[in-house]
Image: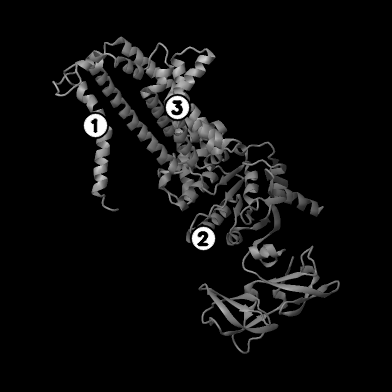
Amino acid sequence: MASKNMMNEQMHEQMVELSNIRKSFGKLEVVKGIDLNIAKGEFFSLLGPSGCGKTTLLRMIAGLEVPDDGVVVINQQSMNGVDANKRPTNMVFQSYAIFPHLNVGENVAYGLIKQRLPKAELRERVDAMLKMVDLDGYYDRPSYALSGGQRQRVALARALILEPKVLLLDEPLSALDKKLREQMQDELRRIQRTLGITFILVTHDQEEALIMSDRIAVMFDGNIAQLGTPQEIYDKPVSRRVASFIGVMNFLEGKCISKNKTSIVVDVESLGQISFPRDIIPEDTSLDQLCVGFRPEMFTILYNKKDKAENEFSSIVKNVDYYGDMSYYTLSLPNSDKDIMVSMRNTSGRYVYDLGETIRVGWRSSSLLVLN
Amino acid sequence: MKKPSVFLFTFVVIYLVFLYAPIMLLPLFAFNDSSIIAFPLSGFTMDWFIGLMSEKTLHRALKNSLIIAVTAAVISTCFGILTARAMARHDFIGKRPSFGLIMAPLFLPEIIIGVALLIVLIQLGVSLNIWTVILGHILICTPFSVSILYSAFNNMDRSIEEASLDLGETRFGTFRRVIFPLVKPGVIASILICFTISLDEFVIAFFLTGVEPTLPVYIWAQLRFPSKLPSIMALGFILLLISLILLAVFEYYRRKSEKLIGKS
């Protein structure tokens, strides 16, 4: 009884439900049978390289493309046969699509005109929205006199003023410089939390997805490779492809030597024989040719003689990438030509190694991931 | 920027003189008090201009030209809008060849076009009248309309139309509130240039006109009479001024169109 209530509750909390969505352009199948549920009030990202189908999927939710197969349900209502202009969604386009012949205020008010509000009320609402996106007093500014970041905020205001159930964002930050992008990431997150609207963001920037999202769907070639929270995707990538797309990853080869019900023993390149519990190995992993990976920050550098780790080896620093707050050391594995990257935070006073110096690396078997 | 050389300066001066000096003769003899077009000048008079006002055949020719020019301009611009939008927004089989065919009249000699159309019309048994001239003019004006409007549509951000739909507007509402305002300067520029081309056009009108001559054809007919020459100079001068004014207005709208679209 309790679980059924929970299921009902969960069902009602879904804002967007996609079932078996397919889309082809000519002979090319761009979206290959996607099932996805996005919860109400969620900040959800579709992450993947160019051509993976994420933008097409977003446009099908918006109603700008019609799926060849499958159903889009928004707020428990099927969107079959519902045109873009009748859907409870609004979109921020990658190019912002600001109307050049209208000024800022007229742009933001565009969708509200149909509602025939009294002039004063319309102006009030537009001004309030402009304030929310930090464009207070910009009503009369002509659209050609705006910077990239300002255009983006006009596009955002224009969409949000219509109080959509779902806000769709198509790579909204890709045209902005780094500082501005970081600023807008905070802004978007803040606005989303304040308004409680479901946001669906399309991006190829994995950092951006990790920073802003409640959950991420990593897409490759028209399919969802992995769905989860940023932490799940970063710490437990299901495949080599997902692992290398997000952050930096070191890859080692491994061969399964023995196995029993609870664990397997893998001979990992350069690191020796390691036992892994069976349950951390992703499904469909072929045990003959395993891929073992670890993030640069999972290994540690032993600075003092008395620092100890479960395992360690020494190596010579081949390259240093210094980022100010972090240092990335490239060094070779013991008895191997293969290079790996290990990173350390430059906490105050911590020594930054130089090229050619010998470094002691410590690691635990739990730092390693087995990947498909 | 490099300082312009003496050669360039000389070249420009000679070029402009060669191009415009003959035209300067028009106002010179239009106000000249003599029925013979020759130097030395005799004196200032407005008689030739005043005389134009009582020429009935002239007024009829003018009326014909205006009807033809307006009709040809409007129809050519309609074709231009449809063609430009199709070219800028859609891909279809035979797109390149169609575009080539539509723009071809720009490169074909007018006399060839005129004669060819005449032959076709005679074969079809169509008698020559205002509409046959309009037909010929649409043929040569449409390429101009297409090229002006194509750049307008091409430079318009495609997402703008989708944004309008996404914000709740209908397709017609999108056209009315977004597309049309943005192409309007281009449309006006197109109408103006097509009107000017048609008004001044002689060769095709000469072949395709029936008993109702256009203004240029009328002028040509009058050249047989030496006494009429100064009046023709006066008329020519008026036409020159009108063409210049129309072209100036056209240029204003063309620039406005580029500025508007260029900013999107």
Q: Is residue B50 above or below residue A325?
A: above
Q: Nearer the viewer, mark 1 or mark 3?
A: 1
- Looking at the picture, how far across and down is residue A198, in whole percent? 62, 50
Q: Using the numbered discs, state the Cα–Cα distance from disc 1 to disc 3 in whole angstroms.
A: 28 Å
Q: Kindly indicate whether the residues beneath marks 3 and 2 are on one polypeptide chain.
A: no
Q: Work out whether residue A134 can be spotted.
A: no
Q: Is residue A123 left or right of residue A250?
A: left
Q: Is residue B220 above or below residue A46?
A: above
Q: Is residue A338 left or right of residue A280?
A: left
Q: Under tag 3, what secondary structure?
A: helix
Q: Under tag 1, what secondary structure?
A: helix
Q: Under tag 2, what secondary structure?
A: helix
**Point 46% across, 17% down: residue:** B132
**Point 76% across, 70% down: residue:** A290
Q: Nearer the viewer, mark 3 or mark 2?
A: 3
Q: Nearer the viewer, residue B175 or A308?
A: B175
Q: In which quadrant of the rendered view does residue A261 lie?
A: bottom right
Q: Nearer the viewer, residue A49 or B8?
A: B8
Q: Is residue A362 above or below residue B66?
A: below
User: Mark 1 belongs to which amino acid?
Assistant: Ala
Number of the label disc, if any, that sits on residue A2: none
Q: Nearer the viewer, residue B210 or A322?
A: B210
Given the image, what chain letter belongs to the residue carrying mark 2?
A
Counting residues from the start of the chain, the first of labels 1 and 3 encountered is: 1
Q: Which residue is mark 2?
A: A182
CA neighbours of label 1 inside 10 A, class few (<14), some (14 to 19), many (20+): few
Q: Is residue B40 left or right of residue A209?
A: left
User: Mark 3 belongs to which amino acid?
Assistant: Ile
CA neighbours of label 2 inside 10 A, class few (<14), some (14 to 19), many (20+): some
